[in-house]
Amino acid sequence: MIWQWRLAFVLFFFLCWCVLGLLAWAIAALASRGRGALLALPVALAAASAAGVLVPMFGQRDVTGFVISLGTATLGGAAGAIAGLAFHRRLRASQPAAMRPVVAHKLGSQRPLEPEPPASTSNPQPPAS
């Protein structure tokens, strides 16, 4: 077999493993409502590829090994996505919270509150006619 076909064969395996890692990442991203999902994507893909590569390295180089590597790539992608989301939460917790603006009106009203006039005046003005 020429080296180009071997390279295409290995790249096909990595494509399969990364697609399964992408599916695991997508489920984790939906579960976290997208918070930290962008940071978790490369972690999930790297973990899926690493988990998929471990199976042939331990001796399973036949069809059974390929099927097992697909399962380990899915589990590795899920673990990587969870680790990436946890890392994002840890980064967000270490940053100070943003200051919230002071609101000068009651909740639900459209206009700011107007200052109330003084309760009593010493010289009341008669209403203009």
Image (cartoon, rainbow, N blue to C red):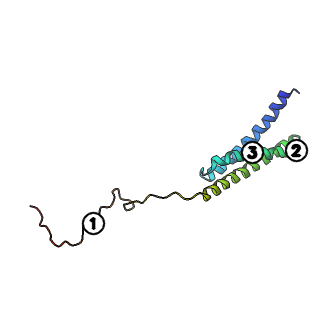
Q: Identify the residue position indicated by label 1 in the image.
A: 116
Q: Identify the residue position indicated by label 2 in the image.
A: 57
Q: Is residue 124 left or right of residue 118?
A: left
Assign a secondary structure to mark 1.
loop
**Residue 15: x percent and y percent?**
75, 37
Nearer-the-camera pick, 88 or 44: 88
Q: Is residue 84 left or right of residue 55?
A: left
Q: Is residue 78 left or right of residue 57?
A: left
- Specify which label sits upstream in the sequence, 1 or 3: 3
Residue at x 76%, y 42% (from the top left corner): 17
Q: Identify the residue position indicated by label 3 in the image.
A: 46
- Specify which label sits upstream in the sequence, 1 or 2: 2
Where the N terminus falls, by quadrant? top right
**Residue 14: x percent and y percent?**
77, 38
Q: Are marks 3 and 2 in contact (CB under 8 Å)?
A: no
Nearer-the-camera pick, 18 or 120: 120
Q: Is residue 39 left or right of residue 54?
A: left
Assign a secondary structure to mark 2.
helix
**Residue 46 occupies quadrant:** top right
Residue at x 65%, y 57% (from the top left corner): 90
